[in-house]
Image (spheres, rainbow, N blue to C red):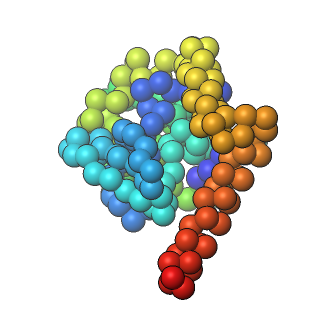
């Protein structure tokens, strides 16, 4: 599999689903904290927090290789869903031959040298997890409307409001300067406290 950015035509229901290195299963991003995220297990619905140091992959940013292009993971999920009538698919513990047949049906022309058996197992496992959790439905694969762009613009304007207070003239450079200033102020305070 390849990590790539696919911001156009996001899948609405699935766009906040993540995989965390070292943790089994899939998770939904619930909200962002100052130093991490609150996530929810897609199957148990249990919420926990993780730190910024966690290696997180948005499924929305993952693609699979074919011989001529990279196909977003959710397009492959959609192919599987249609092939299996939106029901559970083969087990990720199936034989390599069964997994290869499954992959050929799900993504004809997949690159047999760059898509490994482990990738196919993960694909089947993730699909089945999402299917059991109710994320695999015909509505799951409806492409995002232009309204999502408005949401992104709102996020940007919220981010711009904070730097305006510190430096209204130069919004973009203000963010690094504010961070550098905060860090610079923190160091002298601690050394000054030690001296005095």
Q: In which quadrant of the rendered view does residue 147 lie?
A: top right
Measuring 37% from the left and 56% from the top, which residue is drawn there?
50
Please determine whether, in this image, residue 114 is positioned above or below residue 129: below
Q: At x 39% / y 65%, what residue is drawn?
A: 22
| Frontmost residue, 173 versus 102 | 173
Residue at position x 51%, y 51% in the image: 57
Question: Which corner quadrant of the image does residue 29 belong to?
Answer: top left
Tally of marks: 0
Residue 133, position as x, y percentages in the image: 27, 35
The answer to whether residue 106 is left or right of residue 173 is left
Find residue 47 and report its horizontal and vertical position in percent: 25, 46
Residue 8, placed above or below residue 119: above
- Front residue of 72/167: it is 167
Q: Looking at this view, is 59 or 29 the one in front?
A: 29
Residue 179 appears in the rendering: yes
Asked if residue 6 shows in the view, the reply is no
Q: Position of residue 107 (x, y in %)?
A: 57, 38
Q: Residue at x 26, y 36 (%)?
A: 132
Q: Nearer the viewer, residue 165 or 68?
A: 165
């Amino acid at each position: 599999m390849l990590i790539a950015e696919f911001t156009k035509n996001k899948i609405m229901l699935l766009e906040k689903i993540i995989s965390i290195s070292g943790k089994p299963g899939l998770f939904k991003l619930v909200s962002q904290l100052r130093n991490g995220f609150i996530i929810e297990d897609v199957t148990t619905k249990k919420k926990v927090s993780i730190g910024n140091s966690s290696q997180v992959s948005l499924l929305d940013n993952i693609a699979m290789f074919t011989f001529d292009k990279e196909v977003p993971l959710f397009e492959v999920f959609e192919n599987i869903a249609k092939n299996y009538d939106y029901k559970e698919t083969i087990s990720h513990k199936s034989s390599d031959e069964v997994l290869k047949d499954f992959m050929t049906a799900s993504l004809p022309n997949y690159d047999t040298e760059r898509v490994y058996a482990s990738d196919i197992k993960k694909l089947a496992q993730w699909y089945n997890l999402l299917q059991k959790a109710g994320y695999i439905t015909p509505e799951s694969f409806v492409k995002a409307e232009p309204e999502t762009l408005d949401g992104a613009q709102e996020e940007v304007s919220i981010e711009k409001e904070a730097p305006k207070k510190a430096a209204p003239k130069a919004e973009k450079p203000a963010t690094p300067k504010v961070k550098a200033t905060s860090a610079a102020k923190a160091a002298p305070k601690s050394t000054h406290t030690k001296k005095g």
